[in-house]
Each structure stands twice: as structure tokens, then as C-alpha cells.
Amino acid sequence: MDSLLLRLHTETACRRGGALALRPVDLDPDPCLILLREKGETVRWQPVSPTLMRYLLRHAEQRHATETGPLLRYRSGQPITYRRYDHVWVRIGEHLPWVHAQQISTHWLRHTTLTWVERQLRLRHRPGLCRSLRQWGRCRNHRYLRTRNHPRGSCRAGGTHR
């Protein structure tokens, strides 16, 4: 369970609330997308790796998650809560003192993932990643043209990110 949580947050940069709100019905395995409902009623489809998708589907099956109920559950079938995250980081900090000293948290994972992706975009302009960042609201220096033909928008930037 702990490695599933860490992988989910590292791959998607989702908030804890987004992970806790995840339901089996929110998994779209063919294109490897998950529907995240996060802070401020933000809803976004987020791509994930096929490996993470397999783990999420297996977890839902093994923990007997109902289609519209919370996906992430304990072995008993009870949905996890924010307290699970607190417990995970306390246990990690017991084995890795620098985690406790640096106050590493799920929010830290989110921030680090978003920062890393932004920095990679500075090296070379990648429109496909720009679209993903736009979904996260992180592609600051880009304007997106929304038209009837392109409802999802298209990157109109020329050059690198800042």
C-alpha cells in the first residue's frame, strides 16, 4: 500500500485529496488515464504508466472496492484517510532520518515532481508535455488557443519555459 501511494503521487503529482477521492470508476486502463478530483473542484484526466494502472486495478480488486467507492483501502476494506499519509511519513522518517529532518511529505513529492518536469521542459520545448502541464496549471509562459476545432487548446509558445 505504501509503495502504491508513493508511486501514485510521484507519477501524477496529485494532492492527497485527489488520491483519497480516486474511485475504481475513475480508472481508464486502455489509454492509462485516471480521473483526479482535487482542490477547488479541479477535475483532470492524468496519464499514468501501465505499471501503475495495473497496480491500481489489482488493488481495487484485492481490496473489494466498489465502482463508486474509494479506491485506496486497507486490507480490511476500510478506505484510507489522511492519517495513513501521516503514518507513512513517520515510519519512513524512522528509517531515513533525513526524511524527518527535511520534513519530506506528500506535498513535497508533488512540488518536486512538478518542478522536475518544468525544468526538463526548459531544456527542449516539448508540446506534448506542455499539454500535460497545462492540465496541472503549471505551464506559465504558454498561451493556449481554444477554438471549436481544438477544445483542449494547443501550445502557442515559441521557445523554452522559464
Image: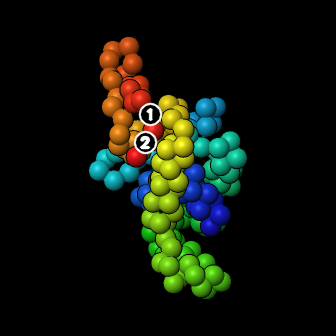
Q: Is residue 82 visible?
A: yes
- Residue neighbourhood size for the residue with mark 2, other residues' Cα within 10 Å, grouped as few (<14), some (14–19), many (≥20): some
Going by the picture, which residue comes out furthest to the top? 149
Where in the figure is residue 98, as x and y percent of width and height?
Answer: 57, 82
Q: Does residue 40 sit above or below 154 in this rendering?
A: below
Please tell me whether mark 2 sits on a helix, a strand or a loop: loop
Q: Nearer the viewer, residue 33 or 102?
A: 102
Q: Amino acid at mark 1?
A: Gly
Q: Which residue is mark 2?
A: 161
Q: Amino acid at mark 2?
A: His
Report the number of discs: 2
Circles 1, 2 touching at the beta carbon (< 8 Å): no
Q: Which residue is mark 1?
A: 159
Q: Quadrant of the N terminus?
A: bottom right
Please tell me whether mark 1 sits on a helix, a strand or a loop: loop
- Residue neighbourhood size for the residue with mark 1, other residues' Cα within 10 Å, grouped as few (<14), some (14–19), many (≥20): some
Where in the figure is residue 47, as x and y percent of width and height?
Answer: 56, 40
Q: Does residue 148 sit above or below 118 in this rendering?
A: above
Q: Is residue 44 visible?
A: no
Q: Does residue 50 sit above or below 119 in this rendering?
A: above
Tell me what residue is drawn at x 45 percent, y 46 percent: 36
Where in the figure is residue 44, as x and y percent of width and height?
Answer: 42, 40
Q: Nearer the viewer, residue 161 or 23?
A: 161
Tell me what residue is drawn at x 38 percent, y 13 percent: 149
Q: Distance between the Cα atoms at labels 1 and 2?
A: 7 Å
Q: Does residue 58 sit above or below 125 in this rendering?
A: below
Tell me what residue is drawn at x 47 percent, y 53 percent: 114
Tell me what residue is drawn at x 33 percent, y 53 percent: 39
